Amino acid sequence: MVIWIVLLAMTAAAVMAVLWPLSRHYAVGRQANPDTQFYREQIAEIERDLARGVLLPSEAEAAKAEAGRRLLRATGMQADEAFAAVGEPALRRRRAASTLALSIIPLLALATYEIYGSPQLLSEPPGARMQPQQAGSSNLLGAVAEIEAHLAKNPQDGRGWEVIAPVYLRMGRIEDAVKAYESAIRHQAPDAARFANYGEVLVLAKDGLISAEAQAAFEQAIKLDPSAPKAQFYLARAAVQDGQTDKAKTILQQLLASSPADAPWTDSVRQELAALGAPESASVAEPQIGPEAIAGMVAGLASRLEAQGGTAEEWARLMRSYAVLGQRDKASDAAKRAREALAQDAQGLKTIDTMAQELKLTDAQP
Amino acid sequence: MLVEAGHFALALALGLSLIQFLVPLWGARANDPVLMAVAPTSALAVFACIAFSFLALTFAYLNSDFSVLNVVQNSHSAKPLIYKISGVWGNHEGSMLLWVLILALFGAVVAVSRNSIPMRLQANTLGVQAAVTIAFLLFILTTSNPFTRVVPAALEGQDLNPLLQDPGLAIHPPLLYIGYVGFSISFAFACAALIDGRIDAVWARIVRPWTLGAWAFLTLGIAMGSYWAYYELGWGGWWFWDPVENASLMPWLAGTALVHSTVVMEKRDALKVWTILLAILTFSLSLLGTFLVRSGVLTSVHSFAVDPERGTFILGILILFVGGSLALFAWRAPMLKQGGLFAPVSREGALVVNNLFLATACATVFIGTLYPLALEVLTAEKISVGAPFFNFTFLPLIVPLLLLLPLGQTLAWKRGNFLGTAQRLYAVFGISLLATVVMFAFTYGGPVLAPLGIGLGLYLVLGSLNEIVTRAWSKGTPLAAAWRKARGLPRSAWGTAIAHAGVGLTVIGIAATAWGIEAIGSLKVGERLKGGDYEVRLERVIPRVEANYREEAAVLTVFGSGRELGTIETMKRLYVTRGMPTTEAGILTIGLGQVYASIGDAQPDGSIGVRLYHKPLVLLIWIGSLVMAIGGGISLTDRRLRIGAPVPAKAIPPHAVPAE
């Protein structure tokens, strides 16, 4: 709310900057002809210089003669220079200009901001969610370094690995997160949640694709705890991936039935079910925990590739990510950019083409 | 929240600029002072908005607010404070924001100097300037928005390009941009004069400080960039005829011509059309430079990111302003009345020659820079035009210009006497010639051009000195009186002499590079490498880990003629976040020369590659540029420029005393 008042005040101040001069009074023809003034000042300065002894009298005389000649010429030219500040037309002009200012400034500013700005971040000030994290960002890095040092000395500390794995995930260091979960599983007693989390980072590492490895992890989790929601959810998605939509539906319905009504995942499960109910949009809906993380990671990958370029494999990964997120136009776009970026690289182009075929990006064919 | 307010302020600036464009131009046409008075207030408001926006972005960098994409891509929480600040303009989006900030700043300064600029000229100028602001604000908002958010916020940034993590970056772009953008004011003044159909000595008088200021900053910016490349890239070169460097050299050459031609206009009311054209061309070349650098047509450290959409947009801006202003010029220029006359042999004549040479030199750089690009576009053939081309075309134009410089500087206004002038310079010429011959004898067998170049530089420095001395002192004058007279000389005379002496110093520095020595070797700890009179010994190699990079630092002891002169440290760094290596040269300054060392990769046998250069008098290149800019600054503070009355014009000087 405060922010809207601030933006309003800014707009008002901007409009006032234009309205203020429009509301002032001007005497007719107030300003002297700048040219004659200029040469008068010049002659005055020659006289001052003469008095100071910087100029010789003969020099001053010659200089004054030339300035005088120009002054005469300038005076001759002075004709229709009187300002038109009063009268009906002037008043109309003022009104028109005021209307322009009152309309153009707020409208253009708001329209531009609406298109390019992020007003949705205003109502829910990012401060609430991000501030503590930013404030702690450097502390966090320090803490990560400490834990890393500790784990380097005690690599069999499964607890430590389990603590750091989600932190790696938040930092976007997916590969490290995978390794951390691997170590956590190796050094601790089997636990359903741990296997499910491990499976999830594996899925994230493959940009949403559920690999055999990930599937094994989820199955392990189910074996330990048949009701593990995250594992069930991802197994359902694995089933979708294999084309077994019916199996997926059954799993999800069971999950929904066995979950408490206020469980945080029910919405995602319902969405997933809805998506399955309309088979023509067979693209996989966003996963339960991952959507933000995945979107963020994909955006990060896209901007990095954009800025620094990358290998064909990375481009292919970006294309697949978009396809998995259901953004097929972006996937085609990525294919196009990849081809531009890898124009010199026949092997790389082949990789991109293969991926494009695999994803059936027909419109992105070269 | 602050970030969003900053973004909104930018949008607000767009609306205000549109008003600043429409209302004052309309007011000037209707001759309505009320409408014209909108120009200064709206220009100030635009500046306030853009400044707020810039501060908001800076704040996001300082706080490492990783919900802003631009911050994520170019910053890192472990980055030192100064690079968090300079990182704001160390990327495409931020640097464009700095560009419009400076543009708006200049507009604001024009707005507050209401008493020295006639109202109509001010209104038209600010109107034209607003058009430039609109174009660049649209460019920023639509294609290069620095305020794009990422949700959820990233936890860590991707760090700034390591080459840009250098104090040089904090200074180089702002200086360069003040130069580039400063010429936009000359451009706006020129268009305003064309729109109004009036141009005279008063106009030249008002425009000159702007041009001079922009020129001085551009000089500093180019020199700074050159020194930065010299110590950061680790090749020991200071000018590479790289298209990006040429992009800044072209407006500089045109701007130098403009600074000189406005003098003629101010004094003699002549060269009006040419001056207007130069003002338009100079800014066009600045825009061209922006296009070359920002569009990704050239791939270099400056391009940040290659993006065809941005390139097309800037190309559109370029075509709009260059085409528009040239069309305006073609339409209105014939209506301008020509002014005063002068004899061919006169200071004015000499300045015309100066303009011809500079314009031609600028054209050669233009061709050398753009021809390869055009060829690549048309025939897909890649050629590279480098130093040999410029040595064969640029130098033959610049050397005669420099040879004529002291003569022109000494000639009288309006009607000069060539023989008389030459006589006043014979001592200068003699001393320089003698110095050349002596140096040639001492360095016999060395490069031939070096003594000639040094002689030329000396001739320029002495010529400038001579100018001041002969104006203040004639035979029989007591020294005290001469000193008083010298101090009484107008600042612009001092500024001219100092700036021209600066050119001489730079020429000496450039000529002396021919004597530079390069040695390459592979050293183990304790081993020595000899380059000319100097020798280095590798003392030790220290690995270090800093917040955002790791480095191997080689400590070298420098020996000269058997004595130990000091130690230098040269580093090979790896910036962890981007995985990018950089070289930090180790430099020991001895007098005006430098011993310069950089290290390469470690060899399998434990030795390390070392490049060693000795560069005599190399500092003079940048000291000269600094002196040039100082000369410009002194000329800028001329009392006559400030109070709005120019130099007394002399019809016929009673004796051969040059005018001021």
Image (spheres, helix red, strand yellow):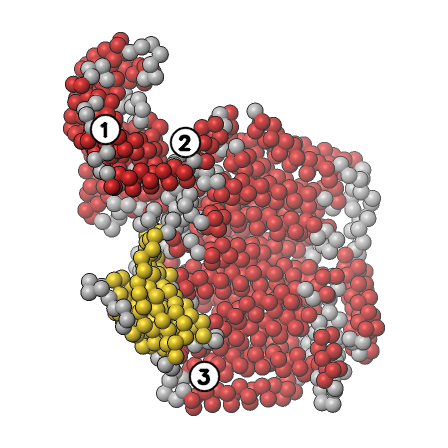
Q: Do the residues at discs 1 and 2 belong to one chain?
A: no
> Tag on residue A198?
1
Q: Position of residue B476 (x, y in %)?
A: 74, 90
Q: Is B213 displayed left or right of B559 in the figure?
A: right
> Could you tell me if the residues under marks 1 and 2 are in contact, i.e. CB atoms within 8 Å?
no
Q: Nearer the viewer, residue A50 or B61?
A: B61
Instruction: List x then y, in percent, for residue B165.
Output: 42, 53
Residue wearing tag 2: B151
Residue B599 in the figure: left or right of residue B289: left
Q: Determine the residue positioned at 27% across, 72% down.
A: B527
Rounded to the nearest whole Å, what is the CA distance between mark 3 and mark 1? 73 Å
Secondary structure found at label 1: helix
Kindly indicate the quadrant of the structure image that contains residue B447: bottom left
Q: Residues within 10 Å of mark 2 (few under 14, many from 20)?
A: some
Spatial CA span between label 3 and label 2: 64 Å
| Chain ID, mark 3 | B
| Image quadrant in which you'd find residue A57 | bottom right
Relative to the observer, which residue lies in front, B385 or B618? B618
**Which residue is found at the position 68% from the left and 64% from the top?**
B637
Residue B301 position within the rendered picture, expressed as x and y whole percent measured from the top left: 39, 55
Under mark 3, the amino acid is: Pro
User: In which quadrant will I find the C terminus of chain B?
Assistant: bottom right
